[in-house]
Image (tube, rainbow, N blue to C red):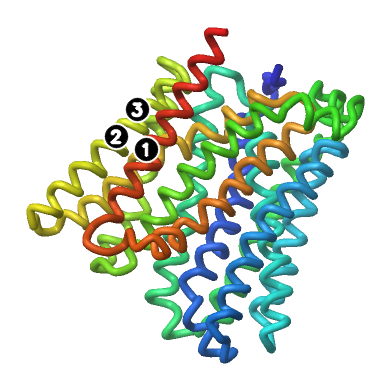
């Protein structure tokens, strides 16, 4: 059972404490993606070196979820939230001062550790302090932190030519340091929270026992994260060749927000299973409809697909944080964060798979997204059958 917020504990304060770290982590994660070609030119990187740089970022996310998630379960979320901020500042400061490929790789890994850590710790911190009926709504609102990617897109488009790439990284250090002071004050009473049931359970059981007891829900969470993040990743891969006007950029990133709220509303009314069925059905209809329209030569169909897909992807993105935490008891932070971030790693290879299979040609890209919808639908069916047993 999840612990709930005490009457004296403000849900909004808890929310903003969790939100501020995730927002800037997403900013720098996507900023690195947008600056990939700039950094390759700056340091004279080969294609293989650029690939290793991207892989290092993904590996750091997974490692951060495991290491800091474990420490958070053993010693308290608040302590690790503050420690993660220190790692974040060190990584971003290093990126802004990187002098060669090796230093770029090292600080890229350090910065990525913080993002992997933030997702699991922030969502667990929130869900343990917000009452059950509002938990999914606040979890969906917490995922609004992904709009840090919108800030990264706008900064790369408008500020990069003026200030250069180093200042784009360095610019986030000042607000993060200031916000860390706010987080410090908000977490002043975290020592009292160290006695919550989940922390007591983590300290009473061994990690191998927790893994054995939770491997089924872990695989379920990992599968959902992989499929849905793959959908979001390939949409970015696909949309990069579409018109990049400011209005389009804002819509592309902003459309995920109403989807998150829709998902939270559906979960509250009918449960996670039906929310996933809604998402999978919508993804299948959108993919097949776009494929047929593309085959008929309809204009602008790709733009419509790229703008509608974030709305659908918002449904699982918004519910994963709260749902993952409900499935695990001991070592909740580590297991939920690892499932999401390892799924992020696997989903990050979706564009490579699409290109290798030739699905990016002649509109067959839409068939790949339809297959992802079928995967989520099959997973929802497994969930329903397990519930009946």
- How far, Cα to Cα, is label 1 from label 3? 10 Å
The residue pinned by badge 1 equals 373
From the top left corner, tell me how far across and down residue 281 is, in percent. Answer: 31, 31
Q: Position of residue 266 (x, y in %)?
A: 39, 22
Where residue 278 is drawn, which disc sits there? 3
Q: Residue 221 carries which label?
A: none
Instruction: Give 52 or 168, whichever is nearer the viewer.
Output: 52
From the image, state whether disc 1 or disc 3 is nearer to you.
1
Which of the two marks, 2 or 1, is nearer to us in this view?
A: 1
Marks 2/3: CA–CA distance: 6 Å
Q: How crowded is mark 2: few (under 14 residues within 10 Å), some or many (20 or more)?
A: some
Could you say which quadrant of the image residue 69 lies in? Answer: top right
Mark 2 in CB contact with mark 1 (< 8 angstroms) = yes
For residue 219, what is the image quadrant?
A: top right
Q: Name which residue lies at 41% across and 40% down.
A: 314
Q: Which sits in the foreground, 377 or 235?
A: 377
Residue at 74%, 24% (x, y): give it.
Answer: 329
Disc 2 target residue:
282
Q: Is 13 on the left-hand or right-hand side of 151?
A: right
Q: In this view of the protein, which residue sits in the foreground, 146 or 213? A: 213
Estimate the spatial distance between the alpha carbons at disc 2 and disc 1, rounded to whole Å.
8 Å
């Amino acid at each position: 059972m999840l612990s709930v917020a005490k009457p004296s504990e403000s849900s909004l304060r808890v929310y903003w404490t969790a939100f501020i770290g995730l927002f800037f982590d997403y900013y720098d994660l996507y900023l690195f993606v947008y600056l990939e070609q700039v950094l390759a030119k700056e340091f004279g990187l080969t294609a293989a070196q650029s690939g290793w740089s991207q892989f290092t970022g993904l590996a750091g996310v997974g490692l951060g979820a495991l290491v800091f998630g474990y420490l958070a379960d053993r010693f308290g979320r608040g302590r690790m939230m503050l420690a993660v901020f220190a790692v974040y500042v060190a990584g971003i400061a290093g990126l802004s001062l990187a002098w060669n490929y090796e230093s770029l790789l090292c600080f890229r890994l350090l910065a990525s550790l913080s993002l992997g850590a933030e997702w699991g710790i922030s969502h667990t911190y929130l869900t343990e302090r917000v009452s059950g009926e509002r938990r999914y709504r606040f979890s969906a609102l917490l995922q609004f932190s992904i709009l840090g990617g919108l800030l990264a897109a706008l900064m790369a488009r408008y500020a990069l030519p003026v200030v250069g790439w180093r200042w784009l990284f360095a610019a986030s250090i000042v607000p993060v340091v200031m916000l860390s002071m706010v987080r410090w004050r908000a977490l002043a009473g975290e020592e009292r929270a160290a006695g919550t049931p989940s922390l007591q359970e983590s300290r009473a059981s061994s990690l191998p026992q927790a893994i054995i007891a939770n491997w089924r829900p872990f695989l379920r969470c990992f599968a959902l994260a992989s499929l849905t993040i793959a959908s979001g990743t390939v949409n970015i891969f696909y949309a990069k060749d579409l018109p990049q006007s400011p209005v389009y950029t804002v819509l592309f990133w902003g459309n995920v927000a109403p989807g998150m709220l829709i998902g939270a509303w559906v979960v509250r009314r009918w449960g996670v299973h039906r929310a996933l069925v809604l998402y999978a059905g919508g993804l299948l209809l959108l993919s097949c409809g776009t494929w047929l329209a593309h085959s008929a030569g309809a204009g602008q169909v790709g733009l419509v697909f790229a703008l509608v897909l974030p709305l659908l992807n918002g449904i699982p993105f918004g519910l994963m944080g709260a749902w993952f935490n409900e499935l695990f008891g001991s070592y909740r932070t580590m297991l939920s964060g690892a499932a999401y971030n390892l799924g992020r790693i696997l989903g990050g290879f979706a564009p490579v798979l699409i290109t290798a299979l030739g699905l990016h040609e002649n509109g067959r890209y839409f068939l790949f997204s339809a297959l992802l919808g079928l995967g989520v639908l099959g997973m929802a069916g497994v969930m329903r059958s397990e519930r009946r047993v």
